[in-house]
Image: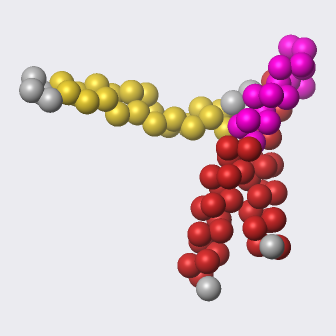
Amino acid sequence: MARRKISNIILGVIIGGIIGAALSYLLSMPFPKGPVKNFFFSALKVGFDTIHVNLGFFAFSLGLSINITLLTVICIFITIYLLYKL
């Protein structure tokens, strides 16, 4: 039972994050610049910058960042709630 709850939370975060990011992008276009747009659609970037490693014979880059908006967080909670109710 605990495994199902964890998988529902992970699935809810992924699906809610994708839906929230798409909605945030689409809904931010018609809003004029101002404090309301900044509050709802400004993204908080969490992660680290790209790190380049060159060993001469082998080179790679590594980086990870996640942009979080208020609408993304709301969609994540709604998705997790719906997954538990269904």
Report if residue 24 lies within the magenta region: yes
Q: Position of residue 75 (x, y in %)?
A: 78, 49
State left or right for residue 10 relative to residue 76: left
Q: Relative to 40, does residue 84 appear above or below in the rendering?
A: below
Q: Which residues are magenta?
A: 20-37
Q: Position of residue 56 (x, y in %)?
A: 10, 23
Q: Furthest-left residue in view?
A: 57
Q: Position of residue 63 (x, y in %)?
A: 40, 33
Q: Position of residue 78 (x, y in %)?
A: 81, 57
Report if residue 82 lies within the magenta region: no
In the image, 62 versus 26, the foreground residue is 26
**What kind of colouring is applied to the model shown?**
secondary structure
State left or right for residue 32 relative to residue 62: right
In the image, 39 versus 13, the foreground residue is 13
In the image, 34 versus 58, the foreground residue is 58
What residue lies at 80% left-to-right and 65% top-to-bottom? 81
Rendering quarter of residue 9: bottom right
